[in-house]
Image: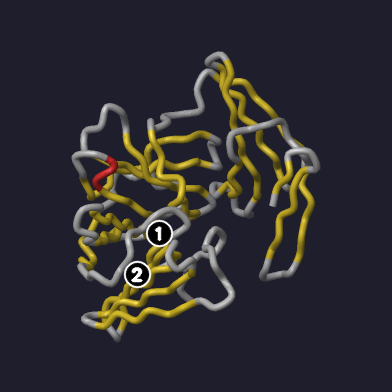
Amino acid sequence: MYDYDEGGVVWNPFLRQTKRIAAAESSCGKEMGYDGSRPEKSYKIIGSWSSNSIHRVGVLEFATNTWNVTHRTSFGEVLTSHDNSSRVSLNGNVYWTGYKYPETGQYFIEMLDFSKEVIKIFCVLPCKGKKCASHHRMLSIYKGDRFSVLQQCTRTSEIKIWVTGKKIGNGDDGDNVVWIKFMTVSRPDLPMLFSHTSYFVDDNIYGKSFVLCCNTKKPRQAWVYIVRGDMCKKIKIDGLLCLNSLLCRPN
């Protein structure tokens, strides 16, 4: 939680501890992660903002609770458009999907590298589309150390899911990422996916599973869908109307 005037609070639900963080200059978004190149996890928050072609990057180290602001001519290789609703964290870094302009039908995973404090393109995605509006894309974590990407066609609602064949290690630059087609889901009872939606997939002794957490406008309600083979189970989440903060994660 963050307030631009008072600063923010970071909560560790596992330890049930909170920590206040200092207020910073106005910035366009803040991300939390850690430097994976160190033997110990050194957590930090990174924010950025631009003015007159000059990028200012603010970094808050949890150990000191102070902001260090630097001026740069570039914050890295930034894509033209981002799918901000599908950001995930892995190995201390933050990843999301996006594309370059003009559109070529090719999409990428972009990352905020917390060890180098820069944004860069990590790898190419296996999904393609003639226009960004023709498909929705979402990123998720698979088996705790790999990526999964979902693409849904806005015309047919068909969902295609890929996973990375090998785990994503600390310091990987994305050059050797290999994508494997995981499953295709074509069901009329699944909704169109928009922002504040999350999912995960798994492959175990029961077969391949696809779990989707989303909300509908009519009725205004939050739902969980579980798809396995020909089975599709729809579960209503009582007492919750919006999924702005609900994430779907496997045990």
* Picture quadrant of residue 202: bottom left
Of all residues, the one furthest to the top in this rendering is 52
Marks 1 and 2 in Cβ contact (< 8 Å): yes
Q: Residue at x 58, y 45 (%)?
A: 31
* Residue type marked 2: Val
* Residue type marked 1: Ser
**What is the total number of numbered labels drawn onto the structure image?**
2
Q: Residue at x 42, y 65 (%)?
A: 218
Q: Please name the colour scheme applied to the rendered image.
A: secondary structure
Res 64 visible: no
Q: Residues within 10 Å of mark 2 (few under 14, many from 20)?
A: many
* Picture quadrant of residue 187: bottom left
Of all residues, the one furthest to the front in this rendering is 218
Is residue 148 placed above or below 65 in the rendered structure? Answer: below
In-front residue for pair 215/62? 215
Rounded to the nearest angstrom, the CA distance separating label 1 from label 2 is 9 Å
The residue pinned by badge 2 equals 201
Of all residues, the one furthest to the bottom in this rendering is 206
The residue pinned by badge 1 equals 140
* Picture quadrant of residue 52: top right
